[in-house]
Amino acid sequence: MHLLGRLLNVKDPLLGIGALLLVLAFVKTSGSSFSPTAHPSYPLGVVGAGLLALGAFLELDERRIRARDRTQRFSEPVLYDAPFWHKVFDAMPPAFVKAVSADEPHAIDHIAENASLERFQGSSRPGTDTDEERNLIRADHRRGDEEALSGGKSLFIESSDTYGISPTRQIVTIKTSVKYGGQRFVVGWFVPVELPQTLGKSETYCAKETGQQVTFGLLNAPDSEGIRLTIGEAAQRAAEARQSRSPQT
């Protein structure tokens, strides 16, 4: 309703027209004097009262929005609509949400994944308890969940849980712990990577950082095998400047 009032800007006209209709319905004028009419028009009064009520509602709703805007993060009302965020979620890179059971703190259930993850991972086929590789993959995922819950965030190099895809797809997963409505959740997203040659047997890997984010590199591919990216002019200039600073061989 507040969107209607804002888009059409009808709040003030509604109040004015409603007040005028009430006057016409119940008051007669004689020169500069006003007195109750002997034959009030009740239908006209009902319409006027309705317009006044609608205008007052829009005014109060607008005040509520302004007050909320001062205390909450976003100013646009659409950013508080769940269906809008469902579309945003599906438009993001592969992402997911897990919920921690209130009754069993060690029970972490996968409750949502977005369209990008579904396209990347495909249908998950049932495995067996004797599948050692899948057990290792899921143990890594569990470890990332627990690290996010205990420390607020986790960054893992791991394998995607896509049983039946060979070879397995390697990913960097970033998970964050959030609280909402008295419940704890793990929200995460990932990007596919090619493992560096220097990974070795170490349990950690120090990746380059830019703006407190992991810096990912681009790998060249033939046109028929890769995804075409558009290069912005500023990025082109930055690449040329970097190349000009590189030692000539």
Image: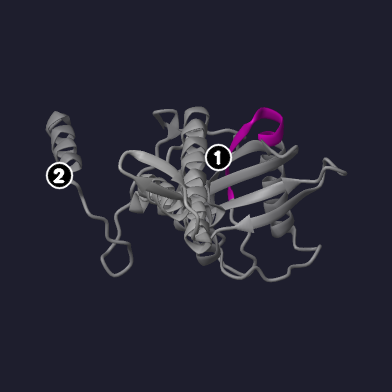
In this view, the residue farthest toward the right is 103
Callout 2: helix, strand or loop?
helix
- Which numbered marker is on residue 233? 2
Q: Earlier in the sequence, mark 1 or mark 2?
A: 1
Query: Which residue appears at 52% of the width and 37% of the height?
Result: 64
- Which numbered marker is on residue 175? none
Q: Judge the density around disc 2: few (<14), some (14-19), many (≥20) Cα neighbours within 10 Å.
A: few
Is 84 placed left or right of 34 in the picture? right
Task: In this rendered view, identify the residue nearer to me: 153 or 22.
Answer: 22
Q: Is residue 79 magenta?
A: no
Q: Name the residue beneath numbered marker 1.
A: 200
| Image location of residue 244, percent across then percent down | 12, 33
Query: Which color scheme is applied?
Result: one colour
Is 162 placed left or right of 76 in the picture? right
| Image location of residue 171, percent across then percent down | 52, 50
User: Can residue 168 be spotted in the picture?
Assistant: yes
Callout 1: helix, strand or loop?
loop
| Image location of residue 222, percent across then percent down | 27, 64
Magenta segment boundaries in residue numbering: 147-158
